[in-house]
Image (tube, rainbow, N blue to C red):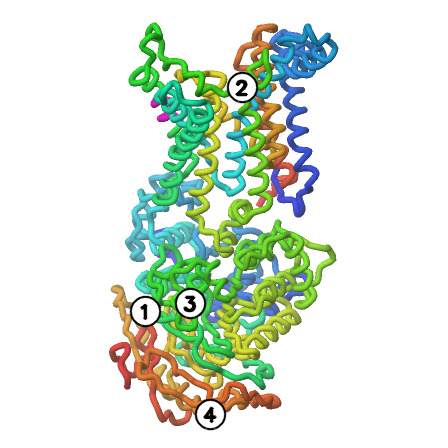
C-alpha cells in the first residue's frame, strides 16, 4: 500500500523546480503521444515549441528590408499571453487567499459584453483617448459585477464559490450568444450572429506593424507592476496570504473573511473582465459567440504554473500561449487534431500538481499489516 | 444484540472476585513524559466506573491502550481473570470492548444505516436494520436509520455511535467525555440509556471531569492526576469538594505579588450574550477587570472560553457595542484592528494557526498583529522581532526562524512578547502556559505579573487552576457559557473552584447534606429535566475586600447596589506603592467559618442533590 506522508520542511528550490519538471515531463509524454499517432516527434517538437525562437532567429538573419511579417508568430504568442496573464494574476490572488474562482471565462465574457456595449453606443466622432479607456473600464466593471455574484452567495449563503462561479460561466456564454443573435445583431451581417464592427476609436492600436501585437501589452505590464507592489508590500497583499495560509489567524489579525471574499472576487473578476474587454477591442473588434473564453480555464494552469507569483505568471502565460500557437501550427503542418493542445494543457496541470504534491509529501510503501 | 443482552442478564453480582475487566500496573511514557504510571483499576458487569481527572491527567492515554491504539510499556489487562493483549481497535472489539469517543466518527454524507453497515461488513442491511430497531427500542435510543448523519443533532449523532457500539455486542463499554458536546437534556437522555444498559449487565468505564455527572451515574470512581491513580472513592458517599480536591491537588504557593496597586475598572463586560451555531453560546456574562490586576477566568475545556476570547478580541463582534467597554468607551462592535488601536492586546490559546502561522517567519508573524499599529516594513519588523526574542528569551538557532520550527514554549514566549512589547493597557490571554515547559511557564507568568505591576489590566482565561491561584487577583468561573460571580482568589480554595467548574454552587453547608439529599434513580425511564437554578449562601468576596488585596495601598470598598456586578474597589492612594515582602497565603478557613454577608452564586445544575434552597435566580438571600 502506498501512503503519502507530510514532509517536515518542503524545500523552496523544489517549489520553483516543480513547474520546470512538469513542463519537461509534458513535452516528453506529448512527443510519445505524437509518435503513437504516427507522426515524427522531432518535427512535432520543432513545430510545437521552437517556432517562435526559429522565427526570431530568421528575423535577425534577414536583411532589414525583407523582414516584413517574419515576427508575426512570435508576436502572436504575446497576443495570446496578454489575456492569459491578466486572468492568471487575478486567479492567483484568489488562490493565494484560498478562494477558488473558477468562473473567469464568465467574467471575461461579461467584460467583453460591457466593452462592446460602450464601443457600439458611443458617438462615432469621439476621441479614441476617451472611448478606449471607457471601454476597458466598462469591461473591468462587467467582470467585477459577474464575480460579485459568487462572492455574495458565498458570504450570505455559504455556497461553494467553485460551483457557483463555474455555473455562471455557462450563463454568461448564453447571454453573449443571445446578445449577438438578438439585440446587438449586425443588421448588415447577412444573418451571422455577430455585432457590427467596433468603431476605429474603440480599437486598441497596434505596436508592431505587420503583426497583431497591440498596446494592451503595455497595459498588462503596468498592471503587473502595480499588483506586484500590492502583493509584496501592502497590508492587502499580506491579508490575502494570511487568509490563504490560516483563516483563523487572518481573523485574529483583523482581516475579516467576508471582506476578503469580496475583495478577492472584485479584483479577479475585474482583471478577467479587463482581459475580455482587451480581446474584444483588439484582435476581434466586434462581439461574436466565440471570443476565446476558454482562456479563463487555461489561466488556472497559468496561475499554478507561475507559482501564484507575478513574475512566474508572466512566464507561464508565455508557455501556455506557445502551446496554443504551436497547436494551431501542428494542426496545419502535421495534421494533428486541435484537441492535442488541450491534451498538452491537461498533462501540464496534472504533472504540475503531482510535482507539488511530492514537494509537500513523500511516498511511503507500506506492507499491509494484518490485524 | 437480543441474544447477547439476554446472555449477560443475571450474571451481575456473581463475579465479584474476578472482575470482568482489570488493569494492573499499566504504565506508558512518551519520551520523557510519563502519561500513565502504574494504573490499576477494575470494573465488573453491571458496574459503571468513573475515571476522573483534569485535562492532561492521562485519561485519554489510558483509554487508547484499552482500545488497542497504544500499547502499555508495562502492566497487564485482564479479562475475566485472564491476561489479554489488545493489539488493535478491531481486536478490542472482538474481545468485547466497545468505545464511544468524544468526537463522532460517522460519515456525514451517509445515512445512519449505511454508517452502521460500514462497521459491520459481515452482516446484511436487513439484519442490521432489525437489530437497530431492537436496540433502539430497548434502550430508548431513537434514531431514524434513513436519516443522513449530517442532519442529526449532536445528541442523535451520539446515539448512532452508541447503537454502533452496541451492535458489536460489547461486554465493556468505554465512554470518553460523552457529554462534552451534548445539551443538558441530551445528557439526561444518555444517562437513562446508560442506566438501563447497566441494569442489563453492561460494564462501563465513564470518563469525565464533570463531577455532577459522576455523582448521578457512577458506582465507583478512580481519580487520576499527573498520570497516576491518586484515589478511588464511592461517588455517592464522597462530597464533590473532596473529589475535586483529589482531582486538582493542592495549590502552589503564590508568586510574590508585592508592590502593586489596584485601580478602577478598565475593561468592563456587561451582560454579554452571544448565540453561536457551533460551540458554546455565552449567556449574560458580566465582569470587570481593573487597572493593576490580573483577572482569572477559570473553567474546564469547552465551556465557552473560545467564544469569550473571540468576543474580547473582536474576532466575534458583540450584538451590542455597550457589552464590552474599555475605560467607559463601548468597543463591542469593533474588529480586532480597531481594538488593538485602543491599546488592547490579545493572545489566543492555539499557537499555530491562530496566534501565529507556521510557514511565516517570526518577523512576518509579528506583522500579523502589528500591522494594526501601522508597523509594516520588513526591516523594522525584523529588528523588532530580534528585540522581542532577546527580551523574552525566545531560543532558536536560526536568524529569523519560521514559527513552525520553534518549540511550544519558545513560540508561546514569542506570542506573549509580541503583544507585551508594545505595552498594552489591557492584555487578554487564553491559556498562557498551555503545553509549555515549567521554565517557560514561570517566565510567562512573571511577565503577566509585571504588566499588572505597572498598572496594566490582564485577563487570563485558563483551565490551569495552579496558574489562577499563582497569578490572579480575582477569579470567575465559566460553566456552559455562563460566568460565575467574581471572587477574590484569597477566598477561594481548589475545591470551591472545582465545584463552580462542574456547575455546582459554592456551598459552605456541611458535607453531609450532599449525600443525604441525593437519591439514586437508576430505574427511571422518563427523564425529568431538573434544571433548577439554585442560589446558595456563601461567605465570599465582600467581607474580605475590606482588607487590602495587596498591602501596598490602602483600599476602600464601594459596595455595588446590584448583586450581579462585582464589587468595585477604588484605591485612595494609587501612587503610593510600598513594597511588602511576600504576602502571606490567605487563611482559607476565614471564608468558610461564619458568613457575615451573603451573596448570590447562581448556576445550573442538572440534579437536585445539592439544592438546600431552591429559589429564583438573582434574588438576594
Which residue is the site of mark 2? A342
Chain containing mark 4: B
Between marks 3 and 4 in the image, the one whose residue lies nearer the viewer? 4
- Crowding at dot 3, Cα within 10 Å, few <14 / some 14-19 / many 20+, comes out as many
**x%, y% of residue B285?**
36, 70
Between the C-alphas of marks 3 and 1, the distance is 11 Å
Which residue is the site of mark 1? B522
**Numbered disc total:** 4
Residue drawn where x is 66% and y is 33% of the image:
A18
Which residue is the site of mark 4? B547
Quadrant of the drawing holding the C terminus of chain B: bottom left
Chain containing mark 2: A
> Marks 3 and 1: same chain?
yes
Between the C-alphas of marks 2 and 1, the distance is 70 Å
* Residues in magenta, as a range: A170-175
- Crowding at dot 2, Cα within 10 Å, few <14 / some 14-19 / many 20+, comes out as some
* Helix, strand or loop status at disc 2: helix
Between the C-alphas of marks 1 and 4, the distance is 49 Å
Amino acid at each position: 500500500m502506498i501512503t503519502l506522508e507530510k514532509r517536515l520542511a518542503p524545500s523552496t528550490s523544489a517549489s520553483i523546480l516543480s513547474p520546470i519538471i512538469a513542463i519537461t515531463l509534458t513535452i516528453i509524454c506529448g512527443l510519445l503521444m505524437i509518435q503513437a499517432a504516427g507522426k515524427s516527434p522531432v518535427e512535432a517538437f520543432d513545430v510545437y515549441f521552437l517556432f517562435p525562437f526559429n522565427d526570431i532567429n530568421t528575423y535577425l538573419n534577414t536583411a532589414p528590408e525583407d523582414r516584413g511579417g517574419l515576427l508575426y508568430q512570435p508576436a502572436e504568442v504575446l497576443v495570446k499571453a496578454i489575456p492569459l496573464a491578466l486572468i492568471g494574476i487575478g486567479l492567483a490572488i484568489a488562490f493565494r487567499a484560498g478562494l477558488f474562482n473558477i468562473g473567469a471565462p464568465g467574467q471575461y465574457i461579461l467584460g467583453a459584453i460591457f466593452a462592446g456595449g460602450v464601443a457600439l453606443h458611443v458617438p462615432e466622432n469621439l476621441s479614441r483617448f476617451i472611448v478606449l479607456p471607457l471601454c476597458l473600464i466598462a469591461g473591468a466593471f462587467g467582470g467585477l459585477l459577474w464575480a460579485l455574484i459568487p462572492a455574495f452567495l458565498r458570504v450570505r449563503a455559504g455556497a461553494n464559490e467553485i460551483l457557483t462561479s463555474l455555473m455562471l460561466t455557462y450563463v454568461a456564454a448564453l447571454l453573449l450568444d443571445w446578445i449577438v443573435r438578438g439585440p446587438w445583431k449586425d443588421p448588415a451581417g447577412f444573418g451571422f450572429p455577430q455585432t457590427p464592427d467596433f468603431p476605429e476609436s474603440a480599437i486598441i492600436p497596434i505596436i508592431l506593424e505587420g503583426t497583431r501585437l497591440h498596446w494592451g501589452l503595455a497595459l498588462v505590464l503596468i498592471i503587473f507592476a502595480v499588483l506586484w507592489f500590492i502583493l509584496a508590500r501592502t497590508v492587502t497583499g499580506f491579508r490575502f496570504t494570511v487568509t490563504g495560509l490560516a483563516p483563523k489567524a487572518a481573523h485574529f489579525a483583523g482581516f475579516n473573511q467576508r471582506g476578503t471574499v469580496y475583495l478577492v472576487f472584485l479584483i479577479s473578476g475585474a482583471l478577467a473582465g479587463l482581459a475580455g474587454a482587451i480581446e474584444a477591442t483588439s484582435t476581434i473588434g466586434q462581439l461574436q459567440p466565440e471570443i476565446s473564453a476558454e482562456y479563463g480555464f487555461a489561466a488556472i494552469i497559468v496561475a499554478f504554473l507561475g507559482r501564484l507569483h507575478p513574475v512566474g505568471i508572466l512566464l507561464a502565460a508565455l508557455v501556455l500561449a506557445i502551446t496554443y500557437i504551436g497547436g494551431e501550427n501542428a494542426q496545419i503542418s502535421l495534421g494533428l487534431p486541435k484537441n492535442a493542445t488541450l491534451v498538452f494543457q491537461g498533462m501540464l496541470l496534472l504533472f504540475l500538481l503531482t510535482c507539488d504534491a511530492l514537494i509537500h509529501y513523500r511516498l511511503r510503501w507500506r506492507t499491509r499489516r494484518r490485524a | 444484540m437480543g441474544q447477547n443482552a439476554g446472555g449477560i442478564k443475571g450474571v451481575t453480582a456473581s463475579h465479584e472476585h474476578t472482575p470482568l475487566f482489570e488493569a494492573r500496573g499499566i504504565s506508558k511514557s512518551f519520551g520523557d513524559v510519563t502519561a500513565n504510571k502504574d494504573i490499576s483499576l477494575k470494573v465488573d458487569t453491571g458496574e459503571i466506573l468513573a475515571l476522573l481527572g483534569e485535562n492532561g491527567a492521562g485519561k485519554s492515554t489510558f483509554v487508547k491502550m484499552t482500545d488497542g491504539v497504544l500499547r502499555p510499556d508495562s502492566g497487564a489487562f485482564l479479562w475475566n481473570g485472564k491476561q489479554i493483549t489488545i493489539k488493535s481497535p478491531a481486536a478490542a472489539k472482538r474481545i468485547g470492548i466497545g468505545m464511544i469517543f468524544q468526537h463522532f466518527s460517522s460519515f456525514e454524507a451517509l445515512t445512519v444505516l449505511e454508517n452502521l453497515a460500514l462497521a459491520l461488513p459481515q452482516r446484511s442491511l436487513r439484519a442490521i436494520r432489525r437489530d437497530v430497531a431492537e436496540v433502539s427500542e430497548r434502550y430508548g435510543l431513537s434514531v431514524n436509520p434513513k436519516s443522513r448523519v449530517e442532519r442529526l443533532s449532536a445528541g442523535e449523532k451520539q446515539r448512532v455511535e452508541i447503537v454502533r457500539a452496541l451492535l458489536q455486542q460489547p461486554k465493556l463499554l468505554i465512554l470518553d467525555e460523552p457529554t462534552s458536546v451534548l445539551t443538558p437534556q441530551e445528557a439526561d437522555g444518555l444517562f437513562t440509556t446508560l442506566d438501563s444498559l447497566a441494569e442489563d449487565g453492561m460494564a462501563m468505564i465513564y470518563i469525565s471531569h464533570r463531577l455532577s455527572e459522576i455523582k448521578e451515574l457512577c458506582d465507583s470512581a478512580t481519580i487520576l492526576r499527573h498520570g497516576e491513580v491518586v484515589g478511588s472513592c464511592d461517588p455517592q458517599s464522597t462530597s464533590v469538594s473532596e473529589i475535586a480536591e483529589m482531582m486538582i491537588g493542592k495549590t502552589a504557593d503564590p508568586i510574590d505579588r508585592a508592590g502593586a496597586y489596584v485601580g478602577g475598572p478598565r475593561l468592563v463586560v456587561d451582560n454579554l450574550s452571544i448565540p453561536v451555531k457551533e460551540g458554546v453560546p455565552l449567556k449574560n456574562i458580566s465582569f470587570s477587570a481593573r487597572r493593576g490586576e490580573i483577572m482569572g477566568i477559570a473553567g474546564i475545556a469547552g465551556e465557552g472560553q473560545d467564544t469569550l476570547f473571540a468576543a474580547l478580541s473582536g474576532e466575534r463582534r458583540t450584538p451590542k457595542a455597550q457589552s464590552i467597554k474599555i475605560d467607559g468607551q463601548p468597543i463591542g462592535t469593533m474588529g480586532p484592528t480597531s481594538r488593538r488601536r485602543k491599546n488592547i492586546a490579545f493572545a489566543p490559546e492555539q499557537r499555530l494557526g491562530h496566534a501565529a502561522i507556521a510557514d511565516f517567519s517570526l518577523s512576518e508573524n509579528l506583522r500579523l498583529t502589528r500591522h494594526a499599529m501601522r508597523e509594516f516594513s520588513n526591516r523594522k519588523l525584523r529588528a523588532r522581532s530580534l528585540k522581542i526574542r532577546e527580551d523574552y528569551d525566545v531560543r532558536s538557532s536560526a536568524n529569523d526562524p519560521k514559527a513552525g520550527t520553534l518549540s511550544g514554549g519558545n513560540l508561546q514566549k514569542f506570542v506573549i512578547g509580541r503583544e507585551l512589547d508594545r505595552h498594552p493597557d489591557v492584555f487578554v490571554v487564553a491559556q498562557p502556559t498551555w503545553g509549555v515547559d515549567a521554565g517557560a511557564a514561570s517566565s510567562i507568568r512573571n511577565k503577566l505579573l509585571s504588566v499588572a505591576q505597572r498598572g496594566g489590566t490582564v485577563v487570563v482565561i485558563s483551565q490551569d487552576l495552579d496558574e489562577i491561584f499563582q497569578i490572579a487577583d480575582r477569579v470567575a468561573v465559566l460553566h456552559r457559557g455562563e460566568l460565575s460571580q467574581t471572587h477574590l482568589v484569597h477566598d477561594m480554595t481548589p475545591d470551591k473552584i472545582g465545584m463552580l467548574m462542574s456547575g455546582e454552587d459554592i456551598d459552605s453547608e456541611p458535607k453531609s447534606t450532599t449525600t443525604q439529599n441525593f437519591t439514586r434513580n437508576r430505574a427511571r425511564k422518563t427523564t425529568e429535566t431538573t434544571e433548577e437554578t439554585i442560589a446558595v449562601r456563601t461567605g465570599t468576596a465582600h467581607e474580605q475586600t475590606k482588607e487590602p488585596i495587596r498591602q501596598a495601598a490602602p483600599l476602600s470598598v464601594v459596595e455595588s447596589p446590584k448583586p450581579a456586578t462585582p464589587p468595585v474597589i477604588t484605591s485612595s492612594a494609587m501612587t503610593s506603592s510600598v513594597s511588602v515582602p511576600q504576602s502571606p497565603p490567605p487563611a482559607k478557613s476565614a471564608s468558610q467559618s461564619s458568613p457575615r454577608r451573603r451573596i448570590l452564586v447562581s448556576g445550573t445544575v442538572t440534579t437536585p442533590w445539592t439544592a438546600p434552597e431552591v429559589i429564583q435566580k438573582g434574588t438576594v438571600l
